[in-house]
Amino acid sequence: MAYATTSLVTLMMLLAQSTAAVRINETAAYQACIAAPATCTRMWLRASQLTGTIPTQLGTLTSITHIEIHTNQLTGTLPTELGALTRMTRMSFFFNWLTGTVPTELGALTRITHLGLGSLRLTGTVPTELGALTSMSWIDLFTNKLTGTLPTELGALTRLTEMNIYVNQISGTVPTELGALTGLKLMLFSTNQLMGTLPTELAALTMIQEMFMCNNPGLCGDIPAGVTLTKEYGYCSTATGGTLLGSACPSMPPPENASNPASFSDEQPLKANWFRKRDVARRNAFPQRFSWFLKQTKREAENNPPYKLQRQKQGAISRSMELACMRELGSTVLDKLTRGFARVVMIYAD
């Protein structure tokens, strides 16, 4: 029994040593580069069980062309100092636990061809500065928490062959400028919050092999001639699943008797026909439409004196309320609205 116990302890110690966490600055590769930065051109630390943060000292390795530190357990943010590595051609940090934003300083890496920042926990927007990386052929930003719209500047990346931004929270329309990326083979945009129609310019992407647009509830309208969508296995049941593509874009009709203020009361904040439950049931388009309604009503209140908003209780229009509503399913939000959750009443004055 004592021998068995000793053997088990020894085995556990060996396993612990074999999986011991290591920081980047403790690796032989990093220390060799810091000792001789002029001759350091590559740092490959893939799947090395690294923990801790990315040292800012990486920004001093100005001769380096390749950094591969993906598939680890790194935390913290991407250092802005990485923007000083102007000889960089390939940089990959995907499959880590990094947070923060995509540094705008990466726009200085004009020689870079591959940028791998997928499957992290990045927030914020896609920097417009990435449009300066005209040598880039491959960009991965998939499975993050990126928001905002796609910069039109990305249309300048004419050498791009792969563009992967699936599983984020990117909104707005697909820029027409992306039609200039005629060498693009993979355009993976599924599972975001894109909306509107697909630009006809996408028909110019004759090299395309896979174009994923599914699970974007706000995408609608006809698919342009010459554009073929493909299915993303594991996320979408069909090539257009979770979208309104192939159907007319939903309209926002005015409420019944809109010119009569008496037709609205505290107990009747919004009429369900504004949101057309059949659309909600079909495509779960309500969150995007509700967001659109909030923005429109705020804009009307600011620009047109005859219109005004009456805010009730403490649930007045706010970004936090809007996001809370957008996280809900359409029918659930309608129910909460009728119970007084963040009620918004439009009063139309003659």
Image: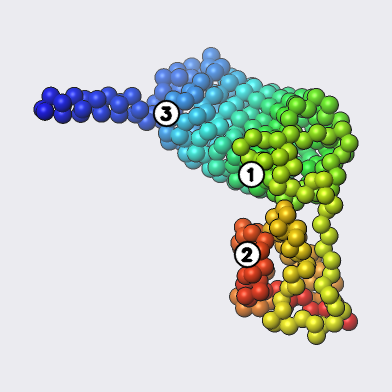
Q: Position of residue 308 (x, y in %)?
A: 78, 76
Give the residue type that dot 1 points to. Answer: Asn
Which residue is at a point 62% across and 57% down the rendered structure image? 327
C-alpha separation, residue under disc 3 versus residue under disc 1: 26 Å
C-alpha separation, residue under disc 3 versus residue under disc 2: 43 Å
Image quarter where the N terminus lies is: top left
Which residue is at a point 47% across and 35% down the rendered structure image? 74
Residue hosting label 1: 168
Which one is in front, 238 or 260? 238
Give the residue type that dot 3 points to. Answer: Gln
Among numbered discs 2 and 1, the one appearing first in the sequence: 1
C-alpha separation, residue under disc 2 versus residue under disc 1: 23 Å
Q: Is residue 32 above or below residue 326?
A: above
Among numbered discs 3 and 1, the one appearing first in the sequence: 3
Q: Which mark is residue 332?
A: 2
Which residue is at a point 49% across and 39% down the rendered structure image? 97
Which residue is at a point 73% across and 54% down the rendered structure image? 282
Residue hosting label 3: 49
User: For mark 1, does the 10 Å Cα neighbourhood hold few (<14), some (14 to 19), or many (20 or more) residues?
Assistant: many
Q: Secondary structure at mark 2?
A: helix
Q: Position of residue 196 (x, y in %)?
A: 80, 49
Q: Position of residue 181 (x, y in %)?
A: 80, 30
Say which quarter of the image contains residue 133: top right
**Farthest residue, direction left:** 2
Say which quarter of the image contains residue 272: bottom right
Q: Nearer the viewer, mark 2 or mark 1?
A: 2
User: For mark 2, does the 10 Å Cα neighbourhood hold few (<14), some (14 to 19), or many (20 or more) residues?
Assistant: few
Q: How is the image coloured?
A: rainbow
